[in-house]
Image (tube, grey):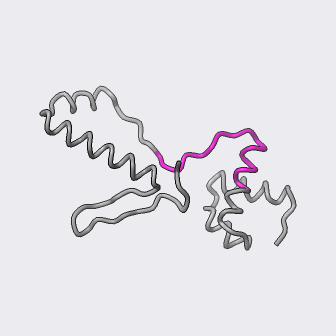
Amino acid sequence: MKYTKQERLHIGGRIYNNEFSKQEAAEQYGITVNTARDYMRMYRDNNLLPAKESARIEPLDSYTKLEQFQSMSKEEFIKELIISRINEARLKKGYEVKGNGARKVFAPLEKENMK
């Protein structure tokens, strides 16, 4: 189905403002997920808005985190650093791991890569 520029901007605005996801917009308006993403980008660029963050990064209380690191042994600190780098690489690939052992679940953040 062909939409006018105003209709595209309206759809993109609803996606940008989290009224529904790209997948839901694709189903509702009979378009692909990539087209829904393009409409959102068109809305964002047209209104000079910042890009949306796919992964939410929680702010850290740096003083508390620093105290935790200082109280660790060298081996514990190295282990935490390795885990941090693994999680960072997973986020770049677009997924995170929830749980552990037999209950480990690989949860995709979104359909697209975050790079």
Q: Residue at x 36, y 34 (%)?
A: 60
Q: Residue at x 24, y 61 (%)?
A: 100
Which image quarter holds the N terminus? bottom right
Tell me where residue 36 sits by quadrant: bottom right
Judge left or right: residue 105 versus residue 52: left
**Residue 26 spot, x, y in % from top left:** 68, 69
**Residue 71 spot, x, y in % from top left:** 15, 30
**Residue 18 spot, x, y in % from top left:** 62, 55
Front in this rendered view, residue 11 or 89: 89
Q: Residue at x 64, y 58 (%)?
A: 19
Q: Is residue 49 above or below residue 104?
A: above
Judge left or right: residue 24 versus residue 71: right
Front in this rendered view, residue 113 or 20: 113
Tell me where residue 6 sits by quadrant: bottom right
Q: Residue at x 75, y 50 (%)?
A: 42
Q: How many marks?
A: 0
Front in this rendered view, residue 82 or 43: 82
Judge left or right: residue 29 versus residue 113: right
Residue range highlighted in magenta: 39-56
**Residue 17 spot, x, y in % from top left:** 65, 51
